[in-house]
Amino acid sequence: MTRDLLLACALGALLSACGSDDEPEETITKTREDLLDPETCKECHVEHYEEWSGSMHAYAAEDPVFLAMNARAQEAGVGDFCVSCHAPMAVREGALPDPGKIAEAPKHLRGVTCYFCHNVAVVEGDHNAQLRLANDLTMRGGVRDPVATGGAHRSAYSELMDRDAPESATACGACHDIVTPKDVHIERTFLEWKGTVFGNFEREGAQTCAECHMGSKRNSPIADAPGVPSRPRRHLHTFPGVDLALTDFPHVEDQRKLIQQELDFTLMAEICVAQVGGSFGMEITLDNVGAGHSWPSGAAQDRRAWVELIAYQGDAIVYQSGAEGQSAETDPDLFQLRDGAYDDNGEPAHMFWDIATTKNDCKDPTRVGCMIQGAATPFTQGYGREHERRRFPLSGLTVGTPDRVTLRVRLTPVGFDVLDDLIASGHLDPAIREKMQTFSIARQGAFMAEWTAQTADLDAQLEGLGPARCTSYTQ
């Protein structure tokens, strides 16, 4: 065996492709301590490492909002509840005696590292990182026939690491569903996925978490070394979702583009406008067609998403809701998309340890916020459809039918009210607030949907408003 091919099997393969599981461990040239360090992986898996290094997995223990919330959580006595997911190897290796001082843990043990995922042997539960590691020298991946090399580490195929296998979703879900010490299920992405067409593998169109959040590169070798064969596909390790690095971090712009691409194909929208005498009314419909879970999801109690709806006559704005500068206090029509979180007294709660109940009913007349459920029924293109409609009453507005109505859905990963709470308590640097990204879902140029009287079809009878002209769903 050549030295180059031996090096091709340097540990930490984000997809195991070299070495075989029947190699004696005494022939392995790297120690487990080597294996724990993602820098070791970089020796032969350069592209995997670079992708991961800009991902939220790598950023999990560096994110200043997380660090601020974790520091404040220590005052509430939550211990290692947060860091068990955000720095799992540091906790499991006993390298973080004080959960509030993550910076004191070795850098290679912070974040969600290569070893933590690729050494998983058993999924023992569906929330709070209930994963059992083998703690051995075998790196598990999605390649069914890893190349035997007699080299630096053993490799094995695992359905938990194969994005085409339904079992792989359980490995993701174990960390991406969170139940608090108060027994409140605040993050439910895995549970949501299981209730959609994407999570139903008895029906065509099912997809695992990784099929959306880990793209693929065709005809690519797994290890960057001479003699290592190309594979039909290798998983990408960028893991785009919603959150974006707020400090100097690798590949931020690449992540921003990937997140935008993911978001742009999650929702579809329709606008209907009806005239009643000299005034008009509007109704919008949002469909969650592309997300394999509710929208928004994850830490949905911290997300702030809303509908921006603006009606024009000529260049003049005659109605707007959700526009820049408006809020729930100044905009009674604001259509918010989020998970409402409340403490024991029924008051809104920002910090997860204070949450006693959640509420996300889109039909709730108080319109505190809701999550659009993931698609549970088939759609013509193989997607699912889940409608949420909202009427925008315009009583007293007698300007006649508008010429144009535009709609965008906007999303801030962590709400400014949450950031302000952490700033006020002294846990978050105020400069971070200015770095928080707000995304706009706009599938048609600047807008997600645009209505005009000329392009809309007479499509529906809106109850109480009469005949309405509606746009078609954006494609």
Image (cartoon, rainbow, N blue to C red):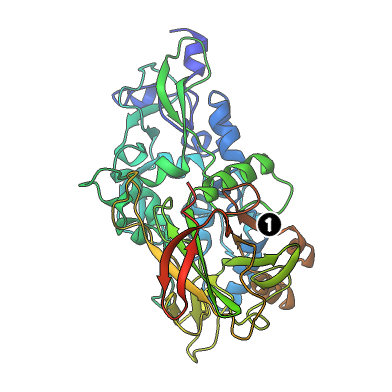
Q: Is residue 441 left or right of residue 346?
A: right
Task: Quarter of the image for the N terminus: give it.
Answer: top left
Residue 139 occupies which quadrant of the picture? Answer: top left
**Horizontal and vertical percent for residue 468?**
47, 68
Q: Is residue 441 above or below residue 16?
A: below
**Horizontal and vertical percent for residue 342?**
50, 83
Q: Is residue 437 left or right of residue 282?
A: right
Residue underneath mark 1 = 437
Looking at the image, which residue sits at the far front? Answer: 277
Look at 65% across and 55% down and name the residue there: 104
Q: Check disc 1 and give the amino acid type.
A: Gln
Q: Is residue 202 left or right of residue 112?
A: left
* Residue 299 makes an appearance in the image: no
**Horizontal and vertical percent for residue 453?**
57, 60
Look at 67% across and 76% down and name the residue there: 399
Looking at the image, which residue sits at the far top? Answer: 2
Q: Is residue 179 left or right of residue 272?
A: left
Disc 1 is placed on an element classified as loop
Q: Is residue 277 above or below residue 216?
A: below
**Horizontal and vertical percent for residue 199?**
30, 51
Looking at the image, which residue sits at the far bottom? Answer: 345
Question: Foreground: 4 or 270?
Answer: 270
* Residue 205 makes an appearance in the image: yes
Look at 55% across and 53% down and name the residue there: 455
Q: Is residue 109 above or below residue 150?
A: below
Mark 1 Cα within 10 Å, few/some/many (few <14, many 20+)? some
- Count of numbered labels shown in the rendering: 1
Question: Foreground: 199 or 25?
Answer: 199
Looking at the image, which residue sits at the far left? Answer: 202
